[in-house]
Image (cartoon, grey):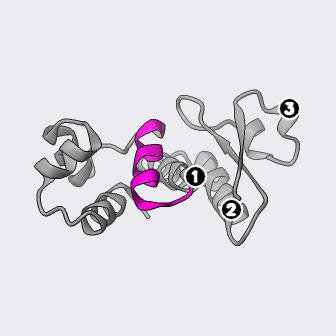
């Protein structure tokens, strides 16, 4: 899913019909919601966590999908490929999810994911 799809899902789940009401629920400006709806940006990690909470979804999955969206929009193929790997690894009932939440996406070192001790900005999120 991308930012617009997540916003639509929040609206549907919470019976919201306007961007104004959505903005109020998310505690952001209506202008910010309009920008996201127009594809002029993506939610940050903290907003991803808020949206995940509102939808009853795993926060790490929302963050990973939005970071993929951001990497694809910036034509950062290596980062996009790394996020795709993260998303694939989160499929099913994975016990542990590695999600990079560093500013500006993830580096090639972070993308390896096989050795989390080598990646300084990785968080381990349990999916219980």
Q: What residue would you read off at disc 2?
A: 90
Locate residue 39 relative to residue 109 in the image: left or right.
left
> Which element type, helix, strand or loop, lies under badge 2?
helix
Q: Is residue 127 above or below residue 76?
A: below
Q: Residue at x 50, y 54 (%)?
A: 62
Residue 80 location (% of width, % of height): 58, 52
Residue at 21 percent across and 66 percent down: it is 15
Could you say which is closer to the camera, residue 84 or residue 28? 28
Are the residues at dot 1 and dot 3 in contact (C-beta closer than 8 Å)? no
Q: Main secondary structure of the magenta part?
A: helix
Between 114 and 80, the one lying in front of the other is 114
Above or below residue 1? Residue 78 is above
Residue 63 at x, y = what percent?
Answer: 52, 48
Left or right, 65 with respect to 120, comes to left
Magenta-colored span: 46-58
Q: Are marks 3 and 2 in contact (CB under 8 Å)?
A: no
């Amino acid at each position: 899913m991308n930012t617009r799809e997540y916003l639509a899902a929040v609206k549907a789940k919470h019976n919201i019909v306007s961007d104004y009401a959505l903005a109020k629920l998310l505690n952001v400006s209506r202008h910010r919601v309009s920008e996201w709806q127009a594809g002029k940006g993506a939610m940050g990690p903290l907003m991803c966590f808020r949206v995940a909470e509102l939808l009853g979804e795993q926060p790490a999955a929302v963050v990973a999908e939005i970071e993929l969206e951001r990497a694809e929009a910036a034509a950062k193929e290596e980062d996009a490929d790394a996020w795709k790997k993260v998303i694939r690894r989160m499929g099913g009932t994975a016990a542990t999810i590695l999600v990079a939440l560093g500013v500006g996406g993830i580096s090639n070192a972070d993308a390896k994911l096989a050795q989390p001790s080598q990646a300084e900005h990785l968080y381990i999120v349990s999916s219980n």
